[in-house]
């Protein structure tokens, strides 16, 4: 598949810079993938498009305040940190205690073994860090000289890791708002450096309403990485090398998903991250795509479905048009960037033709796009 088939023109003013005033009052575009029919609604009315017995599967990862600022020391003087400004994005903590893998803007000028000063949110010196490695892919290793976990340090110095198309400066009030809103209300497992944005539209009240209507809930964890924003740069989509992300599905939630299929309910993946986890686990656990063994699969109203088992690891499953979905029956997702792996996944699920038609409609109707934008339900 040619990558330019994932192109589309988006007026810049449709890139949402802020979330909806109320999470569930985002707009919702409903796409019937069997007919191509489209309906305009709001997220608070999601229950009208679901039915008792359906199972919503959510990603309970928690976004770290992974964006931080630092300065080089002037002339190497430990007492002066008024040198060149640096901006970092925490990726993960390495096995070496206190050593972080980070993306560091301005790293070309930083020397190996140089000491930089990490700033707190008020731009005061917080702690020094030593540059212990510089990798060809732009990743640096920092030895942070603070006796605390990475999460603890980031909670003192970090800002929300908003994508680059959302414009932010050092405004602390804005940062406090983003720390709340660039996070799902059900987040509980710290580790992501980008939000599972389809889940940002849920409120506690909406979830309670859905449960009262007989909608089931299950959870997976996938720590979304910075690679989620990496565009496809190859001419052919399939030649792109997708990033690895850590995931987990525990036994209780696997059982809940299996039970939903056994009773004829639909599995509704809330986001592309959930979709990748469920399909990864299905691929791991199903020995044969044509298996008809009751120990391996269940025959539901939606066809033959693999039985899921508890699983964790890393996934680089790249879902592109032509992929045969094994678990997911419906999907909630935001609107994605052109030439992105996420748009390829949505195109695989909805069909490229219907995905393009839905995006044209969304643009004509002035939906808000990307992380803080509106949502789609593809069923």
Image (cartoon, helix red, strand yellow):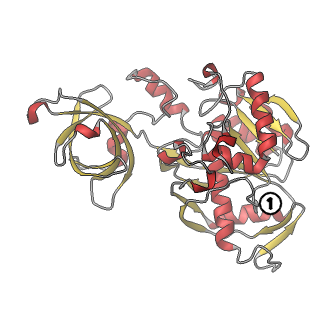
Residue 271, visible in the rendered structure = no
Identify the residue shown where x is 66% and y is 26%: 10
The answer to whether 219 appears left or right of 144 in the picture is: right
Query: What residue is pinned by disc 1?
Result: 260
The answer to whether 361 appears left or right of 196 in the picture is: right
SS under mark 1: helix
Tell me residue 76's x, y (percent). Answer: 10, 36
Tell me residue 306's x, y (percent). Answer: 76, 69
The answer to whether 159 appears left or right of 75 in the picture is: right
Tell me residue 229's x, y (percent). Answer: 53, 42
Identify the residue shown where x is 76% and y is 73%: 289
Above or below, comparing residue 369 to residue 171 in the picture: below
Residue 299's image quarter?
bottom right
Above or below, comparing residue 210 to residue 170 in the picture: below
Q: Residues within 10 Å of mark 1 (few under 14, many from 20)?
A: many
Tell me residue 309's x, y (percent). Answer: 66, 70
Q: How many marks?
A: 1
The answer to whether 298 appears left or right of 314 in the picture is: right
Identify the residue shown where x is 27% and y is 40%: 108
Residue 210, visible in the rendered structure = yes
Identify the residue shown where x is 74% and y is 51%: 348
Nearer to the camera, 62 or 36: 36
Residue 202's image quarter?
top right
């Amino acid at each position: 598949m040619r990558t330019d088939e994932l192109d589309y023109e988006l007026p810049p003013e449709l890139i949402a810079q802020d979330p909806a005033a109320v999470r569930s009052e985002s707009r919702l575009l409903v796409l019937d993938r069997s007919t191509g029919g489209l309906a305009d609604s709001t997220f608070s009315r999601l229950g009208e498009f679901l039915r008792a017995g359906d199972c919503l599967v959510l990603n309970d990862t928690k976004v770290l305040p992974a964006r931080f600022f630092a300065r080089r020391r002037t002339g190497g003087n430990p007492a002066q940190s008024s040198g060149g400004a640096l901006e970092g994005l925490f990726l993960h903590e390495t096995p070496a205690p206190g050593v972080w893998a980070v993306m560091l803007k301005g790293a070309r000028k930083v020397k190996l073994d140089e000491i930089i000063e990490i700033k707190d949110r008020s731009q005061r010196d917080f702690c020094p860090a030593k540059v212990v490695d510089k990798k060809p892919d732009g990743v640096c290793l920092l030895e942070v000289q603070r006796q605390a976990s990475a999460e603890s340090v980031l909670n003192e110095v970090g800002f929300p890791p908003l994508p680059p198309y959302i414009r932010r400066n050092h405004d602390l009030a804005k940062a406090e708002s983003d720390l709340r809103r660039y996070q799902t209300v059900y987040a509980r497992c710290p580790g992501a450096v980008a939000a599972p944005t389809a889940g940002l539209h849920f409120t506690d009240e909406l979830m309670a309403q859905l449960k009262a209507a007989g909608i089931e809930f299950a959870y997976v964890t996938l720590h979304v990485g910075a690679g989620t924003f990496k565009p496809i740069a190859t001419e052919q989509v399939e030649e792109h090398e997708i990033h690895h992300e850590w995931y987990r599905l525990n036994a209780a939630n696997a059982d809940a998903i299996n039970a939903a299929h056994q009773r004829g309910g639909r599995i509704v993946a809330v986001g592309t991250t959930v979709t990748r986890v469920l399909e990864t686990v299905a691929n791991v656990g199903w020995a044969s795509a044509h298996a008809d063994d009751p120990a391996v699969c269940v025959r539901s109203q939606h066809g033959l479905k693999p039985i899921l088992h508890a699983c964790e690891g890393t996934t680089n499953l790249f879902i592109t048009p032509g992929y045969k979905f094994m678990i997911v029956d419906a999907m909630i997702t935001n609107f994605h960037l052109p030439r992105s792996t996420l748009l390829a996944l949505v195109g695989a699920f909805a069909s490229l033709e219907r995905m393009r038609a839905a995006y044209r409609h969304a643009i004509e109707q002035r939906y808000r796009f990307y992380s803080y934008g509106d949502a789609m339900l593809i069923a």
